[in-house]
């Protein structure tokens, strides 16, 4: 299949492709994916009250928004959970999300947000496997994970959920997605260093203020 060949090439030539495809800014990644060494934000789970109105659908990109790697390029399947509960790839690399993300997902779900995932990865089955191993499927009511344009993902979201674009909020780390989805009327928040509490708060407050 074409996508299998593309993923093979991405993973084989990752050292050449990575600097073009993604330029990590203030992250110092260790060999274990997801170890952030600076800039952690405070955990606001207990002190932050959801601003209203809330988005009726909150959509999250995956690669470089929820975790600091490209699933189709920077990690190698098969993935496994070891006896200590750590998820690792075939080279022993630990798969970890950005530090604030697990608590954020819990908080969003606990506060009644409806969540969706949108990814243009070339390796959807690998991403699905990681979502299972991290036990994240419980958070998401809708998922659109396949190569293409994000307008297609969002068209499916509105079709399946009945939520109009104006009632959605979207977090993504790629300019192209932000512009494309902003044009159809979804409020978009550009993620520069992974989803964290400050960015989530800014996004929810902006939505409450501008879409009330
Ligand atoms: Mg991304």
Image (cartoon, helix red, strand yellow):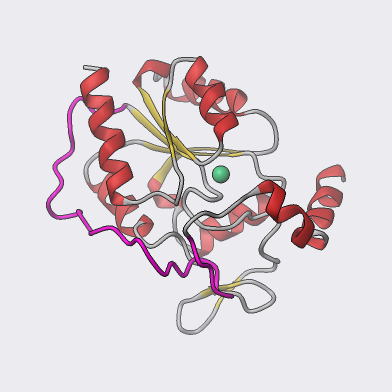
Q: Where's residue 46, x and y in %?
A: 14, 55
Q: Is residue 189 magenta?
A: no
Report the magenta stretch's main SS: loop
Between 169 and 128, the one lying in front of the other is 169
Image quarter in which the C terminus is found: top left
Between 122 and 131, the one lying in front of the other is 122
Q: Is residue 154 left or right of residue 185?
A: right
Q: Residue at (71%, 48%) from the top-left corner?
A: 20
Between 130 and 33, the one lying in front of the other is 33
Relative to 106, is 172 above or below? above
Quadrant position of residue 32:
bottom right
Q: Where's residue 66, x and y in %?
A: 46, 52
Q: Residue at (64%, 55%) from the top-left corner?
A: 71
Numbered range of the magenta stretch: 27-55
Relative to 67, is 144 above or below? above
Q: Where's residue 185, x and y in %?
A: 44, 15
Q: Is residue 83 left or right of residue 78?
A: left
Q: Residue at (21%, 22%) from the top-left corner?
A: 209
Image quarter in which the N terminus is found: top right
Q: Is residue 38 magenta?
A: yes
Q: Where's residue 128, x and y in %?
A: 59, 52
Q: Residue at (31%, 42%) from the top-left corner?
A: 200
| Quadrant hosting ligand 1 | top right
The number of numbered discs placed on residues in the rendered structure image is: 0
Relative to 32, is 101 above or below? above
């Amino acid at each position: 299949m074409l996508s299998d060949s593309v993923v093979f090439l991405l993973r084989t030539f990752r050292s050449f492709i990575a600097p073009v495809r993604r330029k990590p800014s203030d992250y110092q990644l260790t060999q274990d994916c997801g170890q952030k060494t600076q800039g952690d934000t405070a955990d606001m789970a207990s002190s932050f009250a959801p601003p209203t109105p809330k988005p009726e659908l909150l959509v999250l990109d995956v690669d470089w928004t929820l975790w600091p790697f490209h699933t189709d390029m920077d990690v190698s399947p098969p993935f496994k959970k070891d006896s200590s509960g750590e998820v690792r790839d075939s080279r022993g690399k630990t798969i970890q999300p950005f530090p604030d993300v697990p608590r954020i997902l819990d908080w969003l779900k606990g506060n009644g947000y409806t969540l969706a995932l949108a990814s243009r990865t070339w390796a959807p089955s690998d991403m699905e496997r990681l979502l299972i191993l991290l036990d994240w499927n419980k958070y998401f009511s809708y998922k659109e994970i396949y190569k293409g344009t994000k307008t297609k993902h969002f068209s499916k979201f509105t079709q399946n959920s009945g939520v109009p674009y104006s009632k959605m909020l979207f977090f993504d780390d790629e300019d192209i997605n932000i512009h494309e989805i902003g044009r159809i009327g979804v409020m978009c928040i550009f993620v520069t260093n992974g989803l964290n509490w400050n960015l989530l708060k800014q996004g929810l407050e902006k939505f409450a203020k501008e879409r009330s």
